[in-house]
Amino acid sequence: MERQDLERMARVLVHRGPDDEGYYIDPKSGRSGFAHRRLSIIDLATGHQPLSNEDGSVWVIFNGEIYNFQELRSQLEKKGHIFKTRSDTEVIVHQYEEEGPACLEKFRGMFAFAIWDEKKELLFLARDRLGQKPLFYLKEPGRFLFASEIKAILQIPEIPRKVKKEALHHYLTYQYVPHPLTMFEGIEKIPPAHYLLLQDGRMEVKRYWQPDFSYEEHQSEAQWCERIEDALTEATRLRLIADVPLGAYLSGGIDSSITVGLMARLSSEPVRTFSIGFEERAYDELNYARIAAQRFHTQHEEFVVRPRCLEVLPQLIWHYDEPFADSSAIPTYYVAQMTSRRVKVALTGDAGDECFAGYPRYKAV
């Protein structure tokens, strides 16, 4: 892998990591390399990537956050591992030293990461349980490329840009391209809750987790409410660990309002909240967001999306890399743009509808 190829791939991902960049090339073969763009959230001073273990034989690059890293770090230090940073990234490399791919069972978080084991000449890629963080790859004879976005892979000369007709068929059916396919022939997604191993030219992709629906628990409504509140409170507490300002998207709906309410309960300062509204009253929910903001005494900001929103479509197309038919992409882009001017991390409350059948289509499924 040439350094200039890595630099070209990293350059097109600068929007994902505007704070820092780093590179690693295997000193033995010179054929394997990592490039990383960093968005600094934890350990702003020493969390540079790529990052290695104590003797420099295992290297990692990582996108996301390991929420239970402090607990894991304490356990690893007791086993003799020496940490040189305060970042959650370093936990990944040492946990891999202890357990290999089974380390994934220990991580709570959203992540896509790559580990290169110099001694074994083994590449280990992994994606979080629900696929919050993206990870794409292309395997050809004598060449393997991966990245957080398809456009980074396409920076390498001679990579074919051909539409995969099967993916187009699925897109027209489902309004998105399901894993492992992408709209590009030869480029695939690592599915959620899967990892990929590449060694001596042999590749295998394995599932490491799936939800278990095989049992039923019979509890009262009050007991279920208490359990859900405890789980959501702990999840929110873990996500408030950061060395940068935090905020939240607030629609005024159940999911985001619960998230903001828990943040307010756990925070010593007012929560910063951000909402998107529309001039068309039938689609505008700002009034509900204001009610929630007042209830939880947040530092609240609003942005009204006007008809010229179509102007951002070329930018959205560039970011998404392949067709995506959810119209919420436009307001989400605007609220993210507004929020990023004030805070670096925002909690959203996503997946409440999917988990609790919030829309009739989920109940039907």
Image: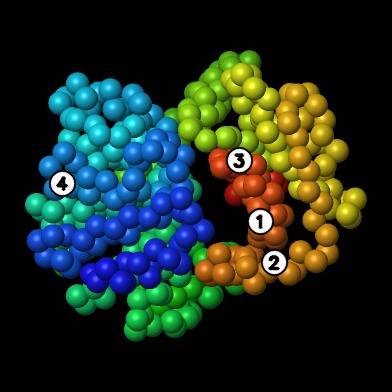
Q: Which residue is mark 4?
A: 56
Circle 4: element type: loop
1 or 2: tag closer to the N-terminus: 2
- Pick whichever, 302 or 133, lies toward us: 302
Residue at image coords 16%, 39%: 54
- The alpha-carbon separation of the residues under discs 1 and 4 comes to 40 Å
- The alpha-carbon separation of the residues under discs 2 and 4 comes to 44 Å
> In front: mark 2 or mark 3?
3
The answer to whether the residue labelled 1 contacts the one labelled 3, judged by CB atoms less than 8 Å apart, is no
Residue 312 numbered mark, or none: 2
- The alpha-carbon separation of the residues under discs 1 and 2 comes to 9 Å
- Pick whichever, 68 or 44, lies toward us: 44
2 or 4: tag closer to the N-terminus: 4
- The alpha-carbon separation of the residues under discs 3 and 4 comes to 34 Å
Q: Quadrant of residue 64?
A: top left
| Residue 245, x across and y down, in percent | 57, 35
- Report the amino acid beneath label 3: Val
1 or 3: tag closer to the N-terminus: 1
- The alpha-carbon separation of the residues under discs 2 and 3 comes to 22 Å
Circle 3: element type: loop
